Image (spheres, grey):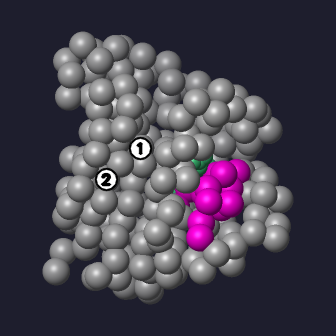
């Protein structure tokens, strides 16, 4: 089943399924991630639009997603919120000019995009030279025991939800040509991390 079909199906239960982790962790992380941002922002894999309410009022946000049903939910969430527009688009082929965004954001997306490196290359391309690409993601741990379990369960999570729990996301960011300027462990040792990267000068 394609990633579009998976997320179209998933869209009906996504917010409900994520509610416990949203309350325990994600809400707080989302708030922290967006405070202090300004300018023109691209959010890739905007999903049901959970981040939209956390953008400061002076941000001009464009959210894209490959699933029309996830986007339909995001449209409901974004009514009356920040300056935002939502578009159906594949992260691997972004329809924006080079150097057009001050910040490019993903939250929990690089685990499900089928080809993360081409998608990150696109984020690199559309980010202004002085801008940042900010990724809040879960990934393969450097701890061998955690990584063993991530590798063990990955075939099941991928088959059921399209989510890869063992991607080497920091390596993928570097492969795309972006320069990682900050890498912060957020939770479960280093499974959840926030990275800030910049396009090459
Ligand atoms: C786990 S959800 C995360 C949604 C949201 N960012 C959040 O924090 O709740 C992953 C999202 O990435 C989207 N996605 C997966 N592959 C994509 C692609 N190639 N292009 C754009 N969006 C994609 C899915 O449709 C889904 O909405």
Q: Position of residue 40 (x, y in %)?
A: 51, 81
Tell me if I can see residue 126 in this picture.
no
Quarter of the image for residue 75 reads bottom right
Q: Which of marks 1 and 2 is nearer the N terminus?
A: 1
Name the dominant secondary structure of the magenta segment: loop
Tell me if I can see residue 13 in this picture.
yes
**The label number, if any, that marks residue 137 in the structure image:** 1
Q: Which residue is depicted at the point 25% across and 49% down?
A: 183
Q: Position of residue 54 (x, y in %)?
A: 62, 60
Q: In this view of the protein, which residue sits in the foreground, 137 or 58?
A: 58
Classify the position of the C terminus by image quarter.
Answer: bottom left
- Please give the range of residues in magenta: 44-56
Judge from the rendering whether residue 172 lies leftward or rightward of residue 69; answer left or right.
Answer: left
Circle 2 sits on which residue? 195
Residue 78 painted magenta:
no
Q: For the residues marked 1 and 2, what is the alpha-carbon distance in whole angstroms?
A: 8 Å
Q: Residues within 10 Å of mark 1 (few under 14, many from 20)?
A: many
Residue 53 painted magenta:
yes
Judge from the rendering whether residue 35 lies leftward or rightward of residue 47; answer left or right.
Answer: left
Labelled pair 1, 2 in contact (Cβ < 8 Å) = yes
């Amino acid at each position: 089943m394609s990633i579009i079909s998976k997320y179209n199906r998933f869209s009906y239960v996504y917010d409900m399924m994520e509610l416990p982790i949203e309350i325990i962790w994600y809400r707080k992380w989302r708030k922290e991630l967006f405070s202090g941002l300004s300018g023109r922002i691209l959010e890739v894999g905007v999903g049901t639009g959970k981040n939209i309410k956390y953008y400061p009022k002076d941000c001009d946000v464009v959210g894209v997603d490959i699933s029309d049903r996830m986007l339909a939910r995001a449209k409901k969430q974004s009514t009356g919120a920040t300056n935002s527009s939502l578009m159906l688009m594949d992260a691997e082929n972004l329809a924006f000019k080079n150097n057009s965004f001050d910040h490019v954001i993903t939250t929990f997306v690089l685990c499900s995009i089928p080809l993360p490196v081409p998608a990150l290359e696109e984020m690199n391309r559309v980010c202004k030279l002085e801008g940042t690409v900010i990724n809040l993601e879960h990934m393969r741990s450097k701890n061998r025991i955690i990584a063993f379990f991530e590798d063990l369960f990955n075939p099941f999570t991928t088959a059921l939800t399209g989510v890869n729990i063992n991607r080497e996301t920091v390596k993928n960011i570097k492969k795309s040509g972006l320069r990682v300027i900050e890498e912060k462990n957020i939770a479960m040792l280093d499974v959840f991390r926030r990275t800030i990267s910049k396009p090459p000068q």
